[in-house]
Image: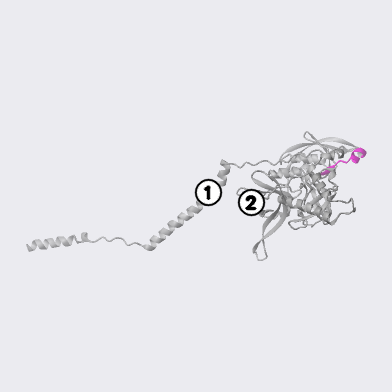
Amino acid sequence: MDQQENKAGQNNESFYFMRETIKERPVNRRKLVRRTMITVFSAVVFGMVACFTFLILEPVISNKLYPEEITKVEFPAEEEEILPESMLTENDLQEELEANILQQIDTADTGEISVEKYGTIYESLYELAARSEAFMTTVTGVSQDSDWLLGTFENENSISGVVVADNGVEYLILAEAAQLSDASEYHVAFQNGIVRAADLKAVDHQTGLGIFGVKYSGMRPEEKEGIAIAQLGISNKSTILGRPVIAIGSPLGQSGSLSYGVVTATGNTLNVADGLYKILDTDMYGSENASGVFINLSGEVLGVITKQSMELRKGDILSAIAISELKGSIEKLSNGETLSYGGILGMDVTREAHENGGMPYGAYVTEVEMQSPAMEAGILNNDVIVRVETTDISSFQEYRNVILSKTPGDTIKLFIKRYSGGEYIDMEVEMTLKEGEK
């Protein structure tokens, strides 16, 4: 019996290891918290990446699926000038407004303008200017610069602009982009206080004028209130001389300033490559940093004040580039198209040169720019361009219109008259247009 008990005890000792208690593994709270934080952080990062990707791709996908309908900007063609004997029905709105102002002047009894009548006239002019401010803007260019300690700071420069069109997606503002050439971003402030970011769509490097686009998607209806689109008038009429005009924008170098006067001369021109622009001179004083536009008594834009137009007078008399010669380039720039460059400076052939010197009518070449398409084509000073492709040319503006209708890279055939051996001989040249350079 004792032997059996001893044997059983030995067997129990042999399997003692099988009776060990298995304990639960203790929880490492620090490790658990760390893993939870990593999971939450990863989720946040993934969400941020997903949101950022959506913000970037959503406009692209939306534009592909639902493209914005952009309306091409087109200005109506100007009618031929009406002869003086047929002027009774021309521009009824302007004549009516002038009559309303002039009828305030009653000199039948005293032969003088009373103070009250004089004040009424200027009140009428001011009201017209105030209404026209609805299509004026302030365009601000922001540029980055650094000081001598390599610290960075921002510079801001502002000029006046005018809303010239609406393409169904954005407001298009004409302003002198050359004055903001160092800017990295642009902002447009409308007269109703709304400020929006703007894109520089295209630039005419010959005049320095450019078109800025301000998208109005997301604008509330009340934000669009007070924003008007300017009507472009006709500045190439002989009757413009002596007509009253108002300078609005920044004619005195300050936004919101204005001046009243009349057109005193139209004989000066701004002669640039492939363009000949009439300059409207006035009796109004302004700043050398002036910008803005001239309007007539109908509120139509007649001219654009630029640095180049002011420099032609070399003084503080306000001058502007006539709007009729600018319409073609404004239209093309508004549609985001690049202007073509030929490199020809010229003028019209005068009646005296034609009758006395036998010079044929056409676009007279006064200068050919170095390394330009015109020079590469072999065009020389004193040549007269009489036809481009199938279009007869009788003035430099007609040559300009043909160039405007082309795109960089187009090759055009020019028919010219060149004086040689006491007579004008016919020549044909081909010119490949380039993109206008800064």
Q: What SS does tag 1 mark? A: helix
Q: Provide residue 24's location: percent of width, then percent of height.
A: 29, 60
Q: What SS does tag 2 mark? A: helix
Q: Which residue is mark 1?
A: 54
**Of 438 and 370, the residue lying toward us:** 438
Sooner in the amino-acid sequence: mark 2 or mark 1 = 1
The answer to whether 209 is drawn above or below residue 397 in the figure is below
Residue 41 appears in the picture as rendered: yes
Tell me if 156 is positioned left or right of 47 in this view.
right
| Disc 2 residue type (three-letter) | Glu
| Disc 1 residue type (three-letter) | Phe
Tell me if 127 is positioned left or right of 219 in this view.
right
Alpha carbon distance from label 2 to label 1: 28 Å
- Residue 287 figure quarter: bottom right
**Of 200 and 127, the residue lying toward us:** 127
Q: Provide residue 43's location: percent of width, then percent of height.
A: 45, 54
